[in-house]
Image (cartoon, coloured by chain):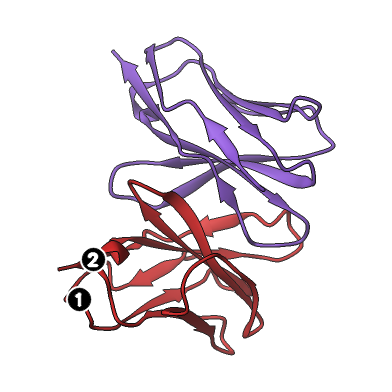
Amino acid sequence: GEDVEQSLFLSVREGDSSVINCTYTDSSSTYLYWYKQEPGAGLQLLTYIFSNMDMKQDQRLTVLLNKKDKHLSLRIADTQTGDSAIYFCAETSGNTGKLIFGQGTTLQVKP
Amino acid sequence: KAGVTQTPRYLIKTRGQQVTLSCSPISGHRSVSWYQQTPGQGLQFLFEYFSETQRNKGNFPGRFSGRQFSNSRSEMNVSTLELGDSALYLCASSSVGTAYEQYFGPGTRLTVT
């Protein structure tokens, strides 16, 4: 079945780069997404990548997709304390609004 | 453009009662999806509505139902509430055909006592 896995916790120093990793099992995934959730809030769409792309860059965010290994990563350059949050990886297959989410990675940024 | 709005934001109910949650999508968005978020199970898909029709359904019991109106606003209903239904219920709207970018509302925090 469909499954998305993420490591649960990452701690970095302010100014360093953060890399959050995700693996998925559904080979028919068409879009893969990264969402951010701050305490007490809903999910904020950060970026997404289409499955026929290898990389997508959006300001401080870089998404890398290895379709062969079904591995997705999100790199945040120059990480700030305001980036502290839970980051969710999600995938969907086909033309559907059903997202399958990972468990979320808590990013802690130390000053 | 206004974002996705959900009402109420917080709700406390007793076991056995029923509850209705409301979601207003971003103007122009016709797809609305609902998710349940709990510490134990994470984010789980409940259902998706498009043009007043349910297009997808997650693996939840029949106590969970929803509907969508002609103006794309959506409601979800949970009947015979159980303690395990305590969760953050999130609604997301999407403009179909644009990489299915789903934009989430702030959620409704439901507590069942």
The residue that appears at 40% across and 68% down in the rendered structure is B5
Q: Mark 1 lies on which chain?
A: B
- Nearest the eye: B13 or A56: B13
- Nearest the eye: B57 or A39: B57
The residue that appears at 42% across and 11% down in the rendered structure is A15
Q: Mark 2 lies on which chain?
A: B
Q: Name the residue under label 1.
A: B15
The image shows residue A43 at horizontal and vertical percentages of 45, 49
Label 1 crowd bin: few (<14), some (14–19), many (20+), radius 10 Å: some
Quarter of the figure that contains the C terminus of chain B: bottom left
The image shows residue B75 at horizontal and vertical percentages of 44, 81
| Tag 2 and tag 1, C-beta contact below 8 Å | yes
Closer to the chain start, of discs 2 and 1, is 1
As drawn, the chain in red is B
> In this rendering, would B111 be left or right of A67?
left
The secondary element bearing badge 2 is classed as helix
> In this rendering, would B79 be left or right of B68?
left
The secondary element bearing badge 1 is classed as loop
Q: Name the residue under label 2.
A: B83
- Distance CA(mark 2)–CA(mark 1): 6 Å
The answer to whether any part of residue B28 appears in the image is no
- Nearest the eye: B54 or B8: B54
> In this rendering, would B29 be left or right of A70?
left
- Nearest the eye: A32 or B18: B18
As drawn, the chain in purple is A
